[in-house]
Amino acid sequence: MKLTEKAEEILESMWIAIEEEGRGFVDLDSVEVTADDPAVRELTGHAFVELKGERIHFRPEGRAEGEKTIRRHRLAERLMMDVLNIRGDNAEIKACQFEHLLNEGVDVKVCTMLNHPTTCPHGKRIPPGECCEEAASRGDLGVVPLTELKSGEEGEIAYILTEDNKKMQKLMAMGVLPGNQIVLMQAFPSYIFRVGYSEFAIDTAMAREIFVRR
């Protein structure tokens, strides 16, 4: 089931107000809607919320859906800032747009790529998903820096995290591209890795900027 963007935004605002700020309900005015708003009718139709006068309350199903919505938004924030290096107000705008694309399945892939983060860039809690719990039970670290691999260990390149364009271009010229396989050949005194049939040596700082999916 796919909700409209406005319905998701109402659930998100309610979840923050009720679950994080400790309110028992939300006034319709605070989420800038009226009782006959199509998004409100959509949520009541799915039995996610109920109206009591000018107040809107969560039903249990709505609280669970609100948690999923806030999780997607905060994962989108992490993706914008940590991977795409988009900062400031622009990051928030992009995250708001992107979160609606993270339906079930896509959010799991993003969460795994980000190594199951527990907080957003502003320090607010990201509700864990089933993928987080499964990863913790397996001891699976998900995506890690190249420096976390052992000599001889292989992984798939997930992304490069650097603000230095020259470093980015240098690594890409080596074949360090998302989806390529990488094998760590040596970790000391420098990091030597193999991509395809070629081997390269880099320092620790650069190795920390290559993120690999084990």
Image (cartoon, rainbow, N blue to C red):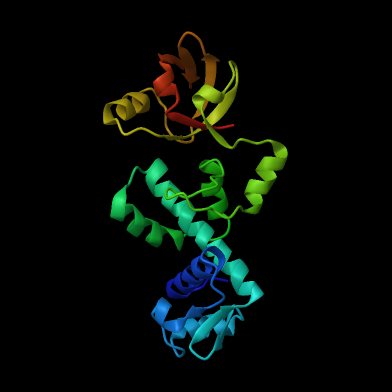
Looking at the rendered image, the quarter that the C terminus falls into is: top right
Farthest residue toward the top? 189
53 relative to 21, above or below: below
Looking at the rendered image, the quarter that the N terminus falls into is: bottom right
Q: Nearer the viewer, residue 214 or 63?
A: 63
Query: Residue 130 appears at what percent x and percent y?
Result: 66, 52
Whether residue 90 is visible: yes
Query: Residue 192 appears at what percent x and percent y?
Result: 47, 14
99 relative to 58, above or below: above
Farthest residue toward the left? 166
Marker count (numbered): 0
151 relative to 34, above or below: above
Q: 148 left or right of 13?
A: right
Residue at 55% across / 40% down in the picture?
115
Determine which quarter of the picture holds residue 168.
top left
Q: 166 left or right of 138?
A: left
Q: Nearer the viewer, residue 185 or 57?
A: 57
Q: Nearer the viewer, residue 201 or 197?
A: 201
Determine which quarter of the picture holds residue 206.
top left
Farthest residue toward the right? 137
Residue at 44% across / 71% down in the picture?
5
Residue at 35% across / 56% down in the picture?
92
Query: Residue 118 appears at what percent x and percent y?
Result: 55, 47
Q: 207 left or right of 59?
A: left
Query: Residue 28 appears at what percent x and percent y?
Result: 45, 83
Residue at 39% across / 56% down in the picture?
95
Whether residue 102 is visible: no
